[in-house]
Amino acid sequence: MSRAAAAPLDEDGSAAVSGISTGRWLTRADDLVGTPGSGADQPDAALRLCFPRQWPGAFKSSAPLQALLKALKGTRVRAVEADAPAAAAAAAAGVPLHALHSFSNAERLETALGWRVVKGFVVYECADKAASTQFVAVRHWWNQRADGAWVDLTSVAATEEERSLLVESKLGEKEEALLDDEGCERATALGRRLRNLPREHAATAAPEPTPRPPQSAKPVIDWGDAEVTTAKSREAPESERAVVLSRTARFAPWMAQLRAQLLEVAYEVVKSTLQQQVDELPDSEEEEDRIKRWNSMPPAEQHSQMMQGMQFVGHRLTKMVELIMQDLLPQMPMDPEALFLASAVQFIGRQYDTALTTLQRSLLASEGTPPKELAARYYYQANLCFKLLQGHEQLTPTGMKKPPPLSSKRAAELTALASTGIKEALRLDPSFKSAYIDAEMVAKFTFPDDPHALVKMHREMVEEACLTRRFWVTGWQRPMHFMRKLRSQPWWDATEFPWVVKMLQAFPDIKREVLAMRAPPAKDAKAERWDEVGTKHDAGDRELVEGGKWSELVLLNADPAVEHLVARNRRKCPNTLKLLDSIPEAAEMAKRGIGESTFSALSPKAHLKPHCGSTNLRLTCHLPLIAPEGCSIRVGQERRTYREGEIMIFDDSFEHEVWHEGSDGDRVVLLVRFWHPDIAAKEYAQAVHHSKESYFLHKRNLVVPPLQPSK
């Protein structure tokens, strides 16, 4: 009579339940899996199993393990270590965790903490390397936290320091049929001995093999299906291991060509769909005209032009998709470079969700990728998350469509993944400028309604990288463009600038002009209206004000959008413009489009949220003309009060915010931006080019995957 007819017993003698009992009871679909000829499906072989010691190095160097994982159809592979914070979170949530109960443990963690259940296999290696180097896998469940980390809180080893290799499975739902007699015996033996295996075999396990010195013979490349070996290895005794080159190294020249072609396609797609030139820094006037035409189009026309652009480069893109997804990836499904190229072509085709999944698989297998290259890919991960969080249109079988709104859980997962991407990019390459800049995006999605928590998080994310002085030098100064040679200080002594004397002398005349414009209009006359900030130009500034109004009268500005306003305002404020024209540092800066001069008014109860200016090429002067009580400004960590006629000079690339906490009329200042004193007049053109190049490179990082060769 077959014992399979009766329910097997647990270790305590009670009826065993699949996935719950103390013994690792398996279903038919969960049977032990070994590589051909390994004998790993026998109980004796199962008793020699323990956890892998050096991952993912062992995975990359082991042909048997790679063969096993290929048979398992794993979609992702990762080494998982003990995670004290995760265990603490589970304990705080009161989640009961039991040894060997991976199925029920994973489900409890998902219910209590929202950590997604991942179903797959845990892989074990043979402790006695002299007896066997084969591997065995059994079904296992674990979890994925919101930050993307895989967590395995099911204890199966003698010590929590042991590692296990987890393979996410493509298989469907778990079958509930019990094992037959032989399967029950193997499962029972394995379940009873797993805890003690590492300790039992610690003394007898063979040491890791010492790497052989590299062969000096020149490799003979065979571009067929045979393995690549050296001439010397072909003549060596069978006991010597042949030198085998990875497929990535073997096809490196071809992969480099493919990558370059894909980069060309990416440039073409961006130019055809977004009307942006990103292969090289464009002529400034030509680019301005292109952007102006694009921004003037209604959304429907923009969408139509994007689709026409996709059709224009669609044939070449389709060929690249076929080459990478149908020819390359099936041959190299676990290769990090092949996976990265697959993700890149999905990004170019605006399939951001799929591109993110493929990229994560690439990152999991990215050991050996140069740090700068890896940093760019982690930033790329963050960029993909931002596009999904912002709801960018994606390409579907029926055309470009806006995706449905994200669930709060998915949004939290993407924000955590973006945070991981930015932090890893900064850790691996502290000179990666875009990672510094877009750390703010992570903070915005984390604290959308708390401006102070937002800037604090941005400061903290870049703080460690700032210590390297490879880009920013302090977390308090965070401009998009930053020139390191310039002095960095939040507040400046006004006496350092000779033209301040002229400004103070002109103060009475300037104030009279402002009071005349802001006086109640005479009968039948029109009141002077100042434009709310962000309505005529620099639309992003509109988001900075809360609780009141922030308005301006533009005096010096090269933006074509306000050219007519500048001409009108010059006639209204002759004394003010005479002063500004006599300050070459301010007039020259405005002509080059790096800064402006305005009258700036802030209404009672208004607050300008903490923010940083766009560049450190300039300083900012505030001459308070009307300063009611309760008006102040913080730059860096120091807050100062506005007083009429007392000039303030500061570097607005430092974090700053402004308050009008009074109730007695608007605060009005003459705001003048001027060149940083460390930049000589002969260097103005070079500084402008430096800033435009910086903006250009950052913009390219946002719209093109990191296919450029790392320098």
Image (cartoon, rainbow, N blue to C red):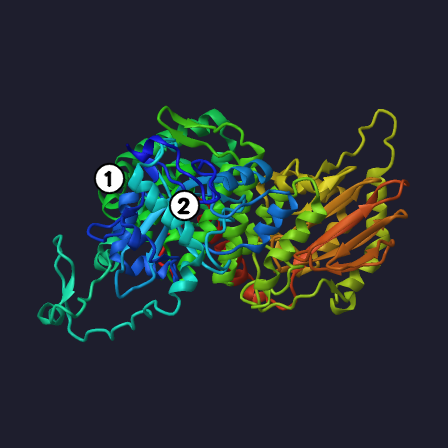
Which label belongs to residue 277?
2
Percent position of residue 320, x then y? 26, 41
* Crowding near the residue tagged with mark 2, few <14, some 14–19, many ≥20 C-alpha atoms within 10 Å: some
User: Which disc, if any, is residue 697?
Assistant: none
Choose between 6 and 442: the one closer to the eye. 6
The x, y position of residue 357, in whole percent, is 41, 42
Q: Quadrant of the N terminus?
A: top left
Looking at this view, is 264 or 336 the one in front? 336
**Residue displayed at 48% across by 58% down:** 158
Q: Amino acid at mark 1?
A: Gln
Judging from the image, what secondary structure is the residue with disc 2 in?
Answer: loop
Q: Is residue 593 visible?
A: no
Q: Which residue is mark 1?
A: 326
Mark 1, residues whose alpha carbon is within 10 Å: few (<14), some, or many (≥20)? Answer: few
Judge whether 442 appears above or below 239 on screen: above
How far across and down, in percent of the image, does residue 374 sit?
A: 41, 57
Please identify the quadrant where the C terminus is shown.
bottom left
Tell me where residue 218 sits by quadrant.
Answer: bottom left
What kind of residue is marked 2? Gln
Q: Mark 2 or mark 1, which is nearer the start of the sequence?
A: 2
Please, what secondary structure does the residue beneath circle 1 have? helix
Q: Residue at x 19, y 67 (%)?
A: 241
x then y, percent, for residue 400: 41, 28
Position of 392 compared to 203: left or right? Answer: right
Marks 1, 2: nearer the viewer: 1
Q: Is residue 239 left or right of residue 487?
A: left
Check the image and report above or below for 21 versus 632.
Answer: above
Residue occupying the point 65% across, 40% down: 448
Q: Nearer the viewer, residue 568 or 484?
A: 484
With 351 as the anchor, is 525 left or right in this view? right
Say if mark 1 contacts mark 2, CB within 8 Å: no
Apparent side of residue 19 relative to residue 341 in the rendered image (left or right): right
